[in-house]
């Protein structure tokens, strides 16, 4: 029987999910999960939930779906040992380190592949099944026919998202939030760059909109077909949503699952009525109902994007027309332009007109003036012209039986102090890396660019496999200036079921033509290339942020690794001991794709360049392979090549992917490489500071408070000694906005030149 799987972001949502008939829930604890901004469960609450749900024959899954740096591994190991002791029904995972540790130490833990792992094909599902996974959560960028085809070719259980918020970027491949401030989506800290308000350069002037804010998924009408396709689990997104939301959505999908065989049309109609209180964004079926993959690429953008739709959720209540003082120092507001009048007890969300702030608020007071106008209280800081949305009404509140017992004092297990065993990576054998020589590697996206960059005499040129280059290479249209031994083919990180068979045939043809080295970026590629006598290099999208992840990939016969774009110097050194650094290719220059979208942008998106409220510039490229958002100012540590070589990292990557390489541009980059000079107007990304670290920030704040307290004591003659840390800077100072992302002026520098970056940070 198919499972209805509901989110439990807090205890109230857990009660609502089970009360409305969910078969299982998924939740996160205080770490290692992709929704760190929600409440999450304390240790004793989680243990009590496992115990209570198992008594009801319900299941509970734990999200361990973030990547871990080397410094996290001891804590991760202890966390897994704790979970192994408590006994949830499954772990939803992203990091290959979790796979490797569970295989080695905790084989009883059931593994489910997170959507962050970007499983979109039978090839990926089957490889994970052989590695011990029971279930895969499919990427959300798939259509019904693709899901049916995957189900027909795999024994792994399939879990499919059917309702809730979408990411505009392909699952697990978003780097935008990380690029702006180290708050990586792959670390559970996404700041939702897709929901932001942007200014675009359009013909004749400027335009503004929420250009990348996707609609919400709703597949209630597709449920019968998905059930008949054999999907084992239907997942509702919403760990950051209210209990009322969870309850209403679960009840609707429960009704369809229980009644569609009696009368499909009536069951769906009844369920849609239940969903009428889902006051979220406009709904979309996204990749469903297209006749072909090409049709989806052409039209899915129109299905998912609405630039006039605000990045937040809720029914539009209008804009603040006037304000005046209210009772108890509250500000009162008159709304105009909406279709519903909020009452006390309703929850609303306010958005500032310049998109600088958003806040949720429960209405407490209502005042009718002598003209019959309704005034409601609003939080301070909002004023005329700001937009207001309804999140939920007071009448939606419903009481459910509690899942957790009143007394959870007897549940006291916590992670222990187990020591993670030492893991050594595989030593490099003699002549093992003959395909992976020391030197400069350059990656390009067109055959024409191969001719431009070969003037720099790189040891290898990496050609991105896309619709254009595949045709040229397979049909041998162009006589390349380099031998096949000097070429590496880079595979796209998104490998969907709809093109899986054709893609594998293409790879076989390229191998037949003499190409022997491939940079792989999806676990499906491992399955497609295994046993075919080729060299596999793990690309930057096979995230190797720790040595246990590297070890798992080594076990898949991968011998060389590209450091992820998000990685830091410190973590890079921690992962690879000196004797293993021959295996690593370090990106030193790139225009990293911040969003990777499986569709062309709508025809109304008549722009290439756009900027955010901080006036940081970006560009978007819409192609037959999808759309890509990149920073206008590239990532560069090109001046650090000698430093890297001194550490033992003697293979570096200059990545021109998704750009047209101009000779003057290439010369400037290459001259900077030769002279070891800083390129002006570029970003360091996470090279120095690494991922945003709230624990570190909290330590800085606490130290700063102690310093200030000591100074106060000293000034008042009560010096208790002690020295505090310096004032907060660096990570904390930039957490509110972009860091080093290049020009902050709307006027762009000439193509191929790097202008001085207004407001950019000191190079390091």
Image (cartoon, rainbow, N blue to C red):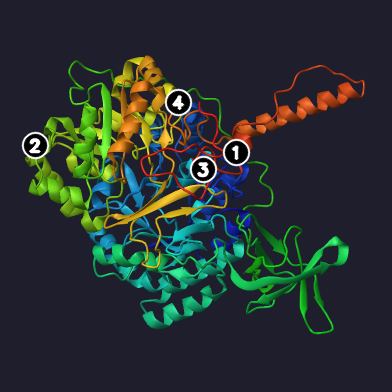
Residue 129 is situated, as x and y percent measured from the top left of the image, at 28, 45
Q: What secondary structure is marked by label 3?
A: helix
Residue position marked by numbered label 3 in the rendering: 180
Label 2 element class: loop
Of the two numbered discs 3 and 4 in the rendering, the one whose residue sits closer to the viewer: 3
Q: Is residue 93 visible?
A: yes
Which of the marked residues, 2 or 3, is nearer the chain's N terminus? 3
Residues under numbered marks 4 and 1 in contact, where contact means CB atoms less than 8 Å apart: no
Residue at 71 percent across and 27 percent down: it is 703
Residue 342, x across and y down, in percent: 70, 74
Closer to the eye: label 2 or 1:
1
The answer to which of 1 and 580 lies nearer the viewer is 580
Look at mark 2 in the image and give the residue it sits on: 514
Label 3 – label 4 distance at C-alpha? 18 Å
Instruction: Say few, some or many: other residues with alpha carbon within 10 Å of mark 2 (under 14 / 14 to 19 / 20 or more).
Output: few
Q: Residues within 10 Å of mark 1 (few under 14, many from 20)?
A: some
Query: Is 424 displayed left or right of 89 in the figure?
Result: left
Q: Which residue is mark 1?
A: 734
**Which residue reaches farthest right?**
717
User: Label 1 vs label 3: CA separation?
Assistant: 9 Å
**Residue at coordinates 42% horizontally, 71% vertically from top-left?**
220
Q: Mark 4 vs mark 1: which is more N-terminal?
A: 4
Among the two numbered marks 4 and 2 on one chain, the one whose residue lies closer to the N terminus? 2
> Residue at the spot x=20%, y=43% of the render?
448
Residue on which disc 4 sits:
569
Element type at marker 1?
Answer: helix
Residue 342 visible from this viewpoint: no
């Amino acid at each position: 029987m198919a499972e209805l799987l509901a989110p439990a972001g807090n205890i109230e949502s857990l009660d609502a999910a089970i009360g409305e008939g969910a078969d299982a829930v998924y939740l996160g604890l205080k770490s290692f999960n992709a929704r760190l901004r929600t409440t999450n469960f304390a240790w004793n609450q989680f243990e009590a939930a496992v115990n209570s749900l198992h008594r009801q024959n319900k299941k509970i899954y734990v999200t361990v779906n973030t990547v871990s740096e080397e410094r996290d591994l001891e804590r991760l190991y202890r966390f897994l040992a704790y979970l192994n002791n408590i006994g949830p029904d499954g772990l939803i995972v992203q990091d290959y380190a979790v796979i490797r540790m569970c295989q080695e130490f905790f084989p009883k833990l059931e593994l489910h592949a997170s959507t962050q792992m970007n499983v979109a094909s039978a090839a990926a599902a089957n490889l994970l099944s052989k590695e011990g996974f029971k279930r895969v959560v499919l990427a959300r960028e798939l259509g019904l026919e693709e899901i049916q085809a995957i189900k027909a070719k795999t024994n792994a259980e399939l879990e499919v998202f059917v309702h809730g918020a979408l990411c505009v970027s392909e699952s697990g491949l978003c780097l935008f939030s990380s690029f702006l401030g180290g708050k990586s989506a792959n670390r559970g800290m996404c700041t939702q760059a897709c929901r932001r308000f942007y200014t675009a350069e359009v013909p004749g002037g400027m335009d503004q909109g929420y250009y990348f804010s996707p609609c919400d998924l709703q597949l209630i009408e597709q449920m019968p077909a998905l059930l008949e396709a054999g999907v084992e689990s239907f997942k509702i997104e919403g760990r950051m949503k209210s209990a009322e939301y969870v309850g209403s959505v679960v009840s609707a999908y429960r009704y369809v699952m229980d009644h569609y065989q009696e009368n499909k049309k009536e069951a769906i109609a009844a369920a849609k009525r239940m969903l009428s209180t889902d006051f979220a964004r406009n709904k979309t079926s996204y990749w469903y109902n297209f006749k072909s993959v090409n049709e989806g690429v052409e039209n899915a953008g129109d299905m998912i994007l609405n630039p006039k739709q605000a990045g937040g959720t809720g029914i539009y209540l209008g804009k603040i027309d006037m304000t005046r003082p209210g009772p108890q120092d509250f500000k009162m507001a008159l709304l105009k332009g909406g279709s519903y009048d909020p009452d006390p007890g309703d929850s609303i969300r306010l958005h500032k007109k310049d998109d600088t702030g958003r806040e949720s608020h429960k209405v407490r007071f209502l005042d009718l003036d002598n003209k019959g106008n309704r005034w409601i209280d609003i939080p301070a800081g909002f004023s005329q012209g700001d937009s207001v949305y309804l999140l939920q009404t007071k009448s939606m509140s419903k009481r459910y039986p509690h899942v957790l017992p009143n007394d959870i004092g007897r549940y006291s297990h916590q992670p222990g102090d187990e020591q993670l065993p030492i893991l050594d990576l595989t030593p490099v054998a003699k002549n093992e890396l003959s395909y992976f020589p020391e030197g400069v590697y350059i990656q390009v996206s067109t055959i024409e660019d191969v001719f431009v960059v070969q003037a720099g005499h790189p040891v290898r040129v990496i050609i991105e496999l896309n619709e254009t280059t595949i045709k040229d290479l397979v049909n041998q249209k162009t006589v390349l200036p380099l031998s096949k031994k000097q070429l590496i083919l880079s595979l796209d990180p998104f490998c969907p079921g709809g093109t899986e068979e054709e893609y594998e045939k293409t790879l076989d043809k390229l191998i037949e033509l003499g190409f022997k080295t491939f940079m792989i970026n999806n676990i499906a590629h491992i399955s497609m290339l295994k046993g075919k006598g080729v060299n596999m290099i793990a690309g930057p999208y096979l995230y190797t942020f720790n040595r246990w992840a590297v070890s798992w990939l080594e076990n898949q016969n991968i011998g060389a690794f590209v450091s992820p774009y998000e990685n830091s110097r410190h973590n890079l050194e921690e992962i690879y001991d000196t004797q293993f650094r021959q295996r690593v290719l370090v990106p030193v220059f790139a225009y990293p794709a911040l969003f990777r979208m499986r569709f062309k942008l709508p025809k109304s998106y008549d722009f290439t360049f756009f900027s955010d409220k901080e006036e940081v510039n970006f560009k978007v490229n819409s192609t037959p392979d999808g759309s890509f958002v990149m920073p206008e100012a590239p990532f560069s540590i090109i001046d650090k090549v000698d430093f890297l070589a001194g550490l033992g990292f003697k293979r570096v990557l200059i990545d021109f992917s998704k750009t047209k390489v101009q000779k003057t541009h290439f010369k400037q980059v290459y001259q900077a490489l030769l002279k070891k000079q800083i390129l002006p107007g570029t970003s360091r990304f996470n090279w120095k500071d690494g991922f945003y670290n709230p624990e570190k920030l909290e330590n800085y704040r606490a130290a700063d408070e102690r310093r200030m307290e000591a100074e106060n004591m000293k000034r008042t003659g009560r010096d208790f000694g002690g020295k505090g840390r310096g004032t907060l800077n660096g990570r904390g100072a930039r957490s509110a906005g972009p860091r080093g992302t290049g020009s902050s002026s709307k006027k762009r520098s000439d193509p191929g030149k790097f202008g001085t970056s207004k407001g950019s940070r000191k190079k390091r």
